[in-house]
Structure formats: C-alpha cells, structure tokens
Amino acid sequence: MNTTLDLEDFMYNSFDINIVLNHLMADSVVPAIATTDPSAHKLDIDLYLTRERQKMSDCNNICDLPIELLELIMTYVSYDEIARVRSVCRLFDSCSQRLLNRGFVKVEKYHNICFKRVKQQLPRRESERRSHPLARHCDVLSAIETRLSLLGMTYMKYVEMTLCCFIPGKVIDEIYRVLRFIQNNPNPPRVHELLQELRDISSMAMEYFEEKIAPSLKSKLSTSATVMTTVGSLNSSPISSCHRSLPSTSSSTPAYQTPRSSPFGDQETNKSNISNNLMKQMQTSQNTIKKEFNEIKVKLKDFSVIKREITALKSKAKESEKSSLEKDQIIAELKAELEDLKRRMSEYDKKSGVKAIKDEQHVHKETVKRKSQRTPTTRAKRVRDNSIQSASEDMAEDLQMDDIAVAIRRRTPVRQETLMTQPIGRNSRSKTNSALALSPKSLPKRNVKNNTNLTENLREKRIKK
Amino acid sequence: MADNADHIDGDDNEDVRAQQNLIKIKLKSSEGGIYECGLTAAKMSDLVKNMVESLGTDAVVTTEPIILGNEAVTDAALKKIIEWVEFHWDDPPVDHDFEDEKDRRNEELSHWDKQFIDVDDQALLFDVIAAANYMDIKGLVEVGAKHICSKIRGKSCQEVREMLKITNDFTAEEEDAIHKENAWIYAKD
C-alpha cells in the first residue's frame, strides 16, 4: 500500500514511472518488497528517492543537466565547434554526434527548400533561364546539391551503421553560410568564387575520411559481423538451453542477468560449470565457424570465376548481336542502293538507247547526203544511188528496230560500235546489202569510183566522135 | 479583481498586461520557499501559464501557491528566475520563424542579461538553466545556453574541461580515435 502511494508521489513529481520501476528492478528492491514486511520496502523506496533526488538536485556540473537540455545548449555553437568539443567527455561526444548527424539532414532540407523556392521563380524555358536574374542562384544551389550528394555518399553509409557520425561540422557551417548569403543577396558572385571554400573543405574532409578513417571502420564492421555470426551460432547452440536452466527470480527477467538475491545456495558451483560449458561451446562453435568460413570462401572464389565467365560471354554475345545488326543494316542499305541503281539504269537505258539510234541515223543521213551532193547526178547513178540509199535506209531502219529491241531486252545502252558491227541474222537480205548497211561509208566510195570511170569513158567517146 | 483578470485574460494590450502584472501569485520551490511574482511575468513560464489557464486565475490567486516540484527549482534558482521574468515581462513575444530564429540565435546577449547570468556559482547557473527548462521559459534557457556557449567558444577541450569542471572519461585510445577523425580540420592550417 505504501509502495503505491510512493509511486504516486513519483508520478506527481514528474518522474517517469517506467524508469523508476526499472531502477527498482535492477537494484533488486522488488524481491525485497515481495518477501519482507511493508515497512522495509517503504524504507528502501525512501532511500532510492533520496538518492535520486540528490542526483537530480546536484546540477554542479553541465553533465548533470538533462541530455535534451545539453543538446539545446550546444545548438548555440557552430557545427565546427560541436565537432571540436567531441573529445571533452563521453556525454559531449554522444551529444555532438547526434547534433552533427541531425545537422547534415537539416542542411539538406534547408537546401531543398531554397532550391524549390528559386525553381518556382525561374521560367520553364532553359534559354530564358540563362538570362534570368536568379540564374546564378540556381547554379550555386545545383552545385551545392552535388556537394551534398557526394558528402552523403561518403559518410551516411557509415552513419546509418552507427560506426561514426557526420564528422565535418565545418562543412555544414559553410553550406549554411552560402545558402544564407544567396537568400539575402540578389546578385551573388560567380559559382566558383562563392563555393571555393566549400569545395576545398568538403573535398579535404572526404579525401581524409576515405584514406584514413573508412578503412578502419570497414575492419571494425567486418569484426562486428563475425561477432554477430558467433552470437547467432551461440543462440542456436545448446548454450542457450544452459542459460535457460539458470535460476531466475521471475520469468520476465532476462536469462543472462545474474540475480543478486538468488534463493539457491550453490550459485558459485553453477557459475563455474556454466563458464566451463560456455568455454567449450565457444571453442567448438569457433572451429565450426572457421570451417564454414573457409568453405564459403572457396565457394565464393568459384562463384566469382563463374561470374567472370558469364560476364565475358554476355559481352561477347552482345558484341555479336551488335555486329549482326550492323551487317543487316549494311545489307539493307546495299539492297536499297541496288534497287535505286536498277531503276536509274532502266531510265537511262530508255533515254540513251533511243538517243543513240537517232543520232546514228542522223549522222548516217548527213553523210549520205554529202556524198550524193559531191557525185555527178546521172539517172542511172541516181537510180542506183537511190536504190542503195533506200536499201541502206531500210537496213538502218531494220537495225534501229532490232537494236531497240535488243537494248530493251538487255537493258544496256546501245553503242555506236555495236550498231556498226552487229551482224543481222534475222534479216533475209543479201550480204552486200548487209555489208553496205554495216559500212555505209564504203558504198559511196565505190560509187564515186564507178562514176569517175563513167565520166572518163563518156569524154573519150565524145573526143572520138 | 479576479473576475476582472479573467475577463481581460486573452488581451495582448500592454496596459492590460501591466494591470495583470500587478496581480501577484505565489510560487513554491522544491525546497519549500514561497515567492511572489507578477501574473504576466509568471506567465512567461509555459508551465505556470498552462496551470493558470486550467485552474483559473481565481484559484491561483486565492488558494495555495503553485508548487514547482522539480528538484532543480531551488530557492536560489527560483529567486533568480523571478528576477529575470520580472525584468522581461514586457518583452515582445518571440517569433519562431526559421530565419528570424537564426538571427535571434546569433544575437548577442544584452548587458543586463550578461550581468544576470554571469554568476560565480556554477551550480546555481546550471540550476537556473535546468529550472527554466522545467518551467518552460524559453528566453531564459536561451540566455543560459548562450552564456555557456560563449564560454566554450574558441577553447580547447582541456580548457573546456577545466572551466566546466568535467572529468575526462575517455580512454586514451578513444580520445586518439576522435582526434584522428578531426585531424583534417587542423591539417588545413
């Protein structure tokens, strides 16, 4: 009854009842309450109260202040200062770590707010953005964004694993400085001028972290991982059953806690037995872990080799696919070109075939005319000439028709030479005619000779008469 | 008079506040000391303000004093707190806007505040800060925090330890590890 009253007093004095109860449990006051008379536990609680009151009232030291208050006080110092005072004491270190981690998240949020504000004021067109008065603001903010992402990639992985905190408080201060400067200045200087210090210190911090601190953190991580595996194996091993067999005052207390007021007398012997068992179990579990670790190592090696091969094959397959695609493309292009060429050729054939024949015909006619103009015009000759001419014309016409037909069939341009030398198998005319037709220049020559002979004969006859 | 006080409770007028400050309420420390304080001044504490609002001004004025049960609220601390709130009762309300808050944070303490908080007894200083925090007097907590921070600023860890009487509970390895983490700051210079 007294205990409940006292607890009410606790509540009235704004103490956390859970914390008090936990303390009571830890100090083994509860078993005493359960076993002894009420006056005794009233005394115990009074003692506890006075002790706690002494603790609370003795604010002689800054470390006696509540942690929330200490954190609040430290927010009035720069982040650089917070990072520097980490090594004052453990409490300062834990507070500083929390504040630094929170500071990085806060500065990221503040940057996002600023960036959003600027982006809302900027025009949508990129060409117009360049000439906008807020263009420099935007450049600076985007540069800070890249810095923040780099910092996040370097530190936050380890921060999330609680291996370290966001160490460079100075960088947070500098980011805040730049962001506030942009907010207050309508015409900020160029990006590289404004962000020179930030770039310098952030890159210095990141390089230093990656060179000097990250390797040790990685090793710490690997050791903690091995510890975790051993703990896991221990939990699954019969040791846990050993723990369960330990005598405990209540079912709620953890098995690994050593009870201060144990009802059993042979506690010491039990302890030694348990420790021996634990040692044995530890050794065996260590051996099994080592074996498993080696096996996993070997498997990992095999796996890595297979992985490499697969990647090599994949790359080869990709290359071959690429080459085949290229080849297909080339073939398609060539086909298209060929078709185009064929079309052009056919057009050209049609045009050039008709033209050549016409030209040939024209030339032939002209030569015949010239020859006929030069020679004396007798009837016989004329008749002969006419007959020859008509024959040659017929031949030419025949040839023309044949050649056009052949050209159309072969789709090749009709050359003048072929016209001159091509035999005419289909024609049923005489060889002389064909010869005349083939060599139209030879015929007038003979005719001229014949004509000259005739004129000489006529002259001789006249002279004789 | 109490009814009057209830009636004008919500007004922000300075005259009204001055009138309200004439009404005295009693505050009891954890050590049992009872001290009088003006109503407006006492309302600078959010704890007292909420109590007054929930109980009603009549009850607060006529009945027993308000008990401040936290052990940090010693007689000396409560006296100092009452001194501070009686001086600052007519301060304009604090704007909690982000940028203004930052400016306010960077502001230096006034001469009166500096003299008020610069006490030789460190235990009293921390009691005042802790009690102000318990009573939720933001302005006074800020004054205390700024004072401590001005002491810390620019000092080495050893100097801070000596000044604030803190014992170094780090092992040599742990201290070296922290120094190593912060070495890049000093490497620049």
Image (spheres, helix red, strand yellow):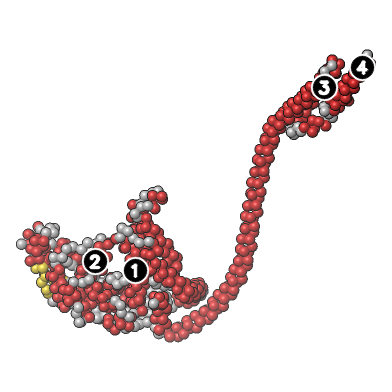
Label 2: chain? B
Three-letter code for the amino acid on which mark 2 is drawn: Arg
Comes first in the chain, label 4 or label 3 = 3
Label 1: chain? A
Residue under label 3? A375
Label 3: chain? A
Give the structural element (helix, strand or loop) at label 3: loop
In the image, B140 versus A221, the foreground residue is B140
Distance of label 3 from label 2 (alpha carbons): 127 Å
The verdict on a common chain for dots 1 and 4 is: yes
Distance of label 2 from label 1 (alpha carbons): 17 Å
Label 3 or label 1, whichever lies nearer to me, is 3
Distance of label 4 from label 3 (alpha carbons): 22 Å
In the image, A241 versus A323, the foreground residue is A323
Q: Say left or right for B39 vs A435.
A: left
Residue under label 2? B104
Image coordinates of residue A375 in percent, x first then y, are 82, 22
Look at the picture and state if A185 lies above or below A435.
below
Q: Say left or right for A38 vs A190.
A: left
How crowded pointer 4 is (Cα within 10 Å; few <14, some 14-19, many 20+) is rated as few
Residue under label 4? A463
Q: Which mark is residue A215?
A: none
Label 3 or label 2, whichever lies nearer to me, is 3
Distance of label 1 from label 4 (alpha carbons): 138 Å
Three-letter code for the amino acid on which mark 4 is drawn: Ile
Give the structural element (helix, strand or loop) at label 2: helix
Residue under label 1? A173
